[in-house]
Image (cartoon, rainbow, N blue to C red):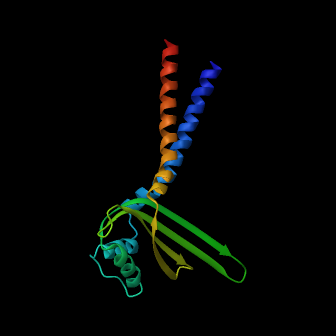
Amino acid sequence: MIKILSSRAASIVLLVLSAAWALATFGPLFYSLFFPTKDIQDIIQALEGRKTLSEELVPLVQQLTATNGKLKHAILVNAYWHLSGDYNVKTSQSEKITQLSYLAWFQKRSKPTILIVTRTVTNDSDLNFAVAEGDPLATLRDYFPPILLLALSVFWCWREHARSLSSDD
């Protein structure tokens, strides 16, 4: 009886932990889907040719469209946020980083690529943007472990529940 309770409790604990890990992994992505960052959306629309950006961001878009062509389609696949602060007696500094990754199809490319747009705000005043290319397999490596652990923990809970029902009969 104690072995069944401990195995069942362990499966529930693993299920809760794996669900928390999956939520921490997919939470920022779903938040970004429902509440998109306006200035990053503006950059994506400028890469598609649907919007004109301010003068300081035009070279960023022109450089990318010159080598890859216009953006045909983009799907948000990953989101990352980072907040940091350095507080000293004389000066303090804060930094907010928002990074969104898109599965992107460009006119001059035959295969999709990962387009990473990073927005950095330093001390609530200095705003910088960067656009880079990422590895599509890296996105899969980010998502595969929490999904796998969640699936295994659900299976283990289901099996333990079925086992406890059969032992009660």
Which residue does the image show at 68% across and 82% down from the upper left?
A: 91
> Going by the picture, which residue comes out furthest to the left?
50
Which residue does the image show at 51% across and 14% down from the upper left?
A: 168
Q: Nearer the viewer, residue 119 or 101?
A: 101
Which residue does the image show at 49% across and 25% down from the upper left?
A: 159
Image location (x, y in percent) of residue 47: 33, 74
Image location (x, y in percent) of residue 103: 37, 61
Q: Nearer the viewer, residue 64 or 2?
A: 64
| Left or right of 165, for residue 10 | right
Assign the N terminus to one quadrant of the image: top right
> Going by the picture, which residue comes out furthest to the top?
169
Which residue does the image show at 52% across and 30% down from the upper left?
A: 156
Image location (x, y in percent) of residue 45: 31, 73
Where is residue 102, by image quadrant? bottom left
Say if 2 sits above or below 62 in the image.
above
Count of numbered circles in the view: 0
Image location (x, y in percent) of residue 71: 31, 70
Q: Nearer the viewer, residue 64 or 31?
A: 64
> Going by the picture, which residue comes out furthest to the bottom?
55
